[in-house]
Structure formats: C-alpha cells, structure tokens
Image: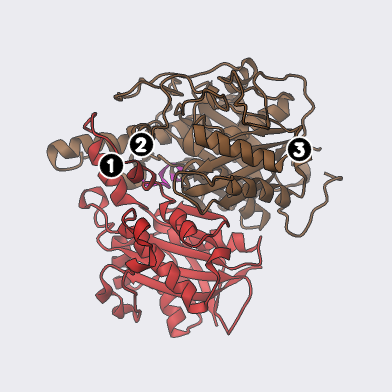
Chain colours: A red, B brown
Amino acid sequence: MDKFFIKSTAICCSDRSLLPRFGLDGYEVDKSLIPIALRRRTALTTRMAITVATKACEKIGIDTSKLSSVFVSLGGEIQVTDALCRLLPDKKALLSPTQFHNSVHNTTAGYWGILNHCPLPSTAIAALDDGFAMGLIEVGSQLQQTDEDILLVCYDEIWPTYLALPIGTYAFACALVLSKTQQDNNPYVTFPKIMPTQLTLNLHWCDLVKQAPAAAAIPLLQAIKQRKNKCIPLNIKATLWQTHLYF
Amino acid sequence: MDNIKKRSSTIESVRISAYSTLNACGLGNQPLLNALKKNERALAPLELFEVDFKTYVGEIKTPLETLSSEYQDYQSRNAQVALTALNCCDDGLRLAVEAAKKCYGNDRIAVIIGTSTSGLYETESAYDYLLKNNEMPEDFNFISRHAYQATGRLLQLELGLTGICFAVSTACSSSAKAIAAGQRLIANGLCDAALVGGVDTLCRLTLRGFHSLSLISESFCQPMDENRAGINIGEAAGLLLLEKNHEANQHQPLLLSVGESSDAYHMSHPHPEGLGAQQAMRSALLLADIDIEQIDYLNLHATATKINDKIEAKAVFALSSPNLICSATKGITGHTLGASGALETIIALLALEHQFIPGSCGLETLDPEFLCQVNAAPLLSQKLRLAMSNSFGFGGNNASVIVAKNYG
C-alpha cells in the first residue's frame, strides 16, 4: 500500500475570516459537544480539536467508538502548562490536580477516547514544522496494520505571547478521516516524501503557518475542496515534505 | 522463530541492534544490570531543586555531556541526558547508528523519541525570570528546548539523519509508543531502521503535580506491597536502535510487538477492571501471535500507587497463566515517566540477555489482594525466551512491549 484515502475533513480557526482567502470554511467551536461535567475541565485546545474531530466523523456517519486516532500538536495544552508554570516560582503554591493531568500532551486524545467510549489506540505526537507530514505518515503506517479507518487531528491553540511569537497568534485545528479503502470516489494521497522539486508556496499560507503551525494542512484541504490532482507541500521550511493528491 | 507462525493480523518483528540507557543507576547498561542483580535501589533525596515536601527520587548524578556549539539552541537537561546515553561507549549505540547509516542511508533511519517533560526544567527557570522581569530571559528558546520534538530533533541533527522524525508524548506510555511507531515504520517499509526510546528529566511541575494528586511517597517506594504509599519520580534516557531483519543481524534480540489501547474511562484513574491494561497486553500477544503462557517474564508498570498497582494486578491475573513471573523495578530506578517504557524494555532485554528475572526492590509483603506472582528477589540462572513490559499513562493510554531473545 503506497496511498490512503481521505473520507472526510473539518476545520476550525480562531479567526474564521482568515479562511475564505484559501477558499475554505471553518466551524465555530462547539462547546455543546463536550458534556458540562467535562467541559469546565477542558481548555480551548481540547474543545477546538474535539469540534473538528466530531464534525469530520459526523459528515460520514462513522462509529467513533471504533476509530483509532492520531493527535498532532506543536504545543498541545500550552495554556494549561503556562498557568501551572506561573505558579511554580511560589514554593508554597498548590497546583490543581485536574490542571496537572490536563497538562499532558495527550489530554485531548484522552478526552476524545472518554467522550466516544473508544478503547482503541490513540496517540499524541509533535514534530514542529513537520507535524502535519508526520501525522500523515503515522496514520498511513498504522493503516497498514488495520482495515479500520483512522482519525487524524492536527491542532494548536493561541499561545502566551512570551513563548515563541509569532507561533500561537491564531488557533487552528483540522481533522481528517483516513482509510485504506476507497468509498464514494474519495481522493487519495501518497505517503509523504521529501521531494527535491521546488514548489511555489502561497505566501498567505506561509504567513499563517508561522502563526498557527497546524495550518500546514491548508494546501491539502484546499486541493480536496477544489478537486484538483496536485503535488501538495506539507510544511513551509526545508526539508520540504510533500504528498500527491489524486481524485 | 520456526515454531512461531505468523497470522495476518500480526506485525513483522524487527531486530534491536543496540541499546543504552542513562538513569539513576549510572551510565550504560552495566550499572543498571548490576543494580537489578543486587536488587539495589538508586533512589536518594532530591538535590536538583527544592520542593516543599519529603520524597526520594531517581536522580541522575552522572556528569552530562555538553551539546556542541552548533546545537546550543537545543541546550536542556533532557537533551544532555539523551546525548550522554547515545554516546555511551560501552553499549555501542552510536556506532550501531553510524553502521546503519552506511547500510541504509541517512534518510532511511527514523528518530522517534517519547517524552513527557522535554525541556520543562529549563522553562521553569525561565518563568522565575518572567515573573520578576515581565519578559523571558534572552536565551529562552521554547521551540528547541521545551517543545516535545526538541530532544528527538537534537539527536537527529547530532547523528546527521534526515528522514522521519517526531516525538510521541502520551504521558507515561510515551516511549513504549515511540517503540511501537518505530517498529511499524520499519515493518511497513517506510524506513529501514529507527532510533527509538524515551527521555524524561526531573522538574518541579511533575514532582509538585504528582504531589497534588497525593501520589508521591515520602519514603522509598514499595511497588505491589501491601503498604505501598506512592511514587518516587525518576529520570532517564532509554534509547534503542531498531533495524529490519536481514541475514547479518540474526544474532540480535527481537522486538516482536507493542500492543496499544485506551481506557476511555478517566484522565488519571485507570479503568476499575483494568480493561485497557488487559487490552494492551492482549493486543501485543495477538500482534506477535503468541500466547501469554509463552511469556517468561513480565516487567510491570507498578508505580507503587494504591490504585494503579491494584488495577494492574487485576488485569494481569485476568489475562495470564498462574505461572507468569512478574516484577516491578521502579523501586530501583524510580518512575521515569515518559522514559519508563523504553527503560523497562531495556530491563526486559537485560533479563533475556543475562537469563535472570529481576526482583521488586521495596516489596516486602505482597498485597494479599493480588493473585499474580510478583517476584521480590532476583532469580538468577533462569531460562528465558520472551519478556513483556507494561506502560500505562494519564489519559488512559496503555502500551505493552514484547521482546525476544535472539533465535539466531
């Protein structure tokens, strides 16, 4: 197997007005997708990632209790970690146990599994500029071991300004349901590779990725919407990972 | 492996051509092996920084290598611990990577590192500065020191590798899942070798965080004991080079499989019946196409908390044959969090290589509720062929690794 099919996609962006220039639409964060008891424990990052994951799954009516998942984020629960780090200089300050277990990188993956009663494997990875490319590789690799579909969620929230500006200026999340088998003329992508060919990168996109790393997925999402067979860049910095999209 | 037939739902095994560790026992596999054979704890009061409560930790006292001037942006305790383990001459890990580069090419060797702390220790000091000065210190570099991929990326740069590289961060199962990802990539032909494992280092957030959950022990931890009272946190690097099977490496040990599952129950409490833990072990057995009766030694996750040990004992009993011998080694090294999956896979490999079953340092009286066999003192001169290691993390994230002695 050297390719896999894209069955469904969904996007969320903290500033939805940024999306039309790419010909894309995004969902509002839908807090109601998380039960109230859990909602007060979750940060924007989890709510946003769960919104896109739920929307992508709803579109194709897939059973989310039987879906392995790969969550990709550069900073993960950065606001939770930041709030905890601000307490640490005070040796007497008590940390919230809930905040502590919600600071792990797989917090969103954990809540997704709890909400969907899904006992299947879920992972949380990070790869800076290459996050989306590595997420596709990890999903593609997992797909070779299973006949079931796999959920890929790529997300990053708004970051405190003193950490790594311009990273975290905007929050962005997208979800893709990926499959080994084709259904309803789904498009497919080839395994990401480092390509020698120089692609001309859209400057608006490069600018947004510098501020919201998960937006690396935009050219692929754009080409899916436009139904274009295309060579797609998956990151903006050397080394350039690319894939081919085919209909 | 003539007597082990493969089913379609299985994964192709890969060779483990070299491995090394740095932990509280010292640098390399030998100090760890010595401590395991003597069942000797390497835990001591915390020296690296101050906390407001009493505990013991598995702190690395070995001098750490400094990063070359070229990679100063990546300077963190986590990166230094990783680099020191990579360069441990006695274990030949770096030489093995260099040989693999010649054999497969720089772009065909992946780097998949599990971590939960990354460079958090340095970030904490930066926050001291931030709160006093309203800005981060000049040399603060979140992306190359603290972001999760930083340590893996440093190893990739240091080794001159150019292929797939990412971090897995699923709390205490991080490095077991990094091993899983590496095996999958090789088995599916996406690379020919993978440097995998985990690195986590002591920091205030994890110590005080676990303390807030009332999970830190004031005294030496006692995994699986009826009087167990919590965790001693540790720090470690555990690195392994995985390679595809070929004629020249048939003498090396094998990674047979890694089973993974989710509890889907609670962020920090395991499923009361241990269903997730059972599923991870079952899945590992299925992927390797072996029965639990064939496992000669199980290294438990056993952190020494009341609830986790109880649930794991329940899960192991539900699944295993009564003869399976288990032990818990966190009483020696401390709980090295995101590195524990790799460190304890290395312990399983040492048990296979040296044909002994480690003990459970700190265990005096097995909790009478536990019906599985937990070995208190090391058993030498054993005949072992297959070993398993469990890792369970926050978010209900579980992984079980199965390794085999060479069949050459």
Q: Are marks 1 and 2 in contact (CB under 8 Å)?
A: yes
Q: Which residue is mark 2?
A: B209
Disc 1 crowd rating (10 Å Cα; few below 14, some 14-19, many 20+) is: many
Respond whether the residues carrying marks 1 and 2 are from the same subunit. no
**Against A58, is A142 above or below?**
above
Amino acid tagged 1: Leu
Decide if residue B154 is on the left or right side of residue B224: left
Q: Nearer the viewer, mark 3 or mark 1?
A: 3
| Residue drawn at (56%, 46%) of the image | B398
Looking at the figure, which quarter contains the C terminus of chain B? Answer: top right
Respond whether the residues carrying marks 3 and 1 are from the same subunit. no
Amino acid tagged 2: Gly
In reply to whether residue B151 is colored magenta, the answer given is yes
Task: Specify start and end residues of the magenta stretch as a single range.
Answer: B147-153
Disc 2 crowd rating (10 Å Cα; few below 14, some 14-19, many 20+) is: many
Q: CA distance from mark 1 to mark 2?
A: 9 Å
Mark number displayed over residue A84 = 1
